[in-house]
Amino acid sequence: MLLAGIARPSRVSAATAVPADLSAGAMFAQADWVVKLVMIGLIIASVVTWTVFIAKQMELRRASRTADGLRGAIMSARSLSDLSPAAEDAELVRLTREELAQSGDALIDSEALKERIVSCFDRHEALLARKMTQGVTILGTIGATAPFVGLFGTVWGIMNAFIGISEKQTTNLAVVAPGIAEALLATALGLVAAIPAVVIYNHFARQIAAHRAIVSDSASALLRLVSRDLSRGTLRAARD
């Protein structure tokens, strides 16, 4: 009975030795410097993800609104001369006017002229796609690498937990818990950085594809205007 009474306080003291503060801030403060670097890197990646989302969303919204207006203006025109002043300022129309001016007396060869205009349009769409995807590719990189960076922090935290067990020759929860907590926090931060990055990347991929489709529609409609003016024999007048 006496031995039982003596042993009971030791179990209570072992239980009370468990760290009381296991908040995210406390776990970060107690983490190994390698795990801290992993966490900071993942936090920065998450901030970059949301910064790109806000900036790119605004850019694509403006570009889509402008492209929609241009498509409507071109499709409602009966000839190049019917285009509105706002449409004349668009890059596609400017490229068409430049090609018409450079072709000069070669306007009689309608098929060659249309091929040159299509070539200009293809070049414009390629440059536009490159501009639209700027900043988006980093989201794919974050989405692909963040879970593995978090996993590295997890492995390192668990390794520190086992080292603590070995050094102190005990499996007390107070020794094991901090390292395990660090490991789980690194895993969570990896997922927090990766999941939004993948979702936002797919969202922008769809938006960019839709924007390119609108630009392609506008280019096709503009080429029809050129073909129509060629058939009427009014292209030179429209150019001037």
Image (cartoon, helix red, strand yellow):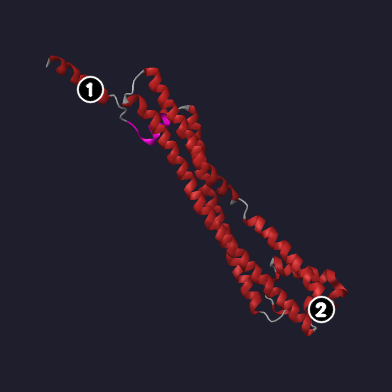
Say which quadrant the N terminus sits in: top left
| Residue 169 part of the magenta segment | no
| Residue 25 part of the magenta segment | yes
Q: Residue at x 38, y 29 (%)?
A: 178
| Residue farthest right in this picture | 105
Three-letter amino acid code of the residue under disc 1? Arg
- The region drawn magenta spans 21-29
Seen from the viewer's position, the closer of residues 63 and 146 is: 146
Q: Which mark is residue 236?
A: 2
Say which quadrant the C terminus sits in: bottom right
Q: Seen in the image, is 25 located left or right of residue 96?
A: left
Residue 135 pos. (x, y %):
60, 50
Residue 74 pos. (x, y %):
66, 75
Q: Which residue is mark 1?
A: 11
Q: Seen in the image, is 59 located left or right of residue 7?
A: right
Q: Say above or below: 34 vs 229.
A: above
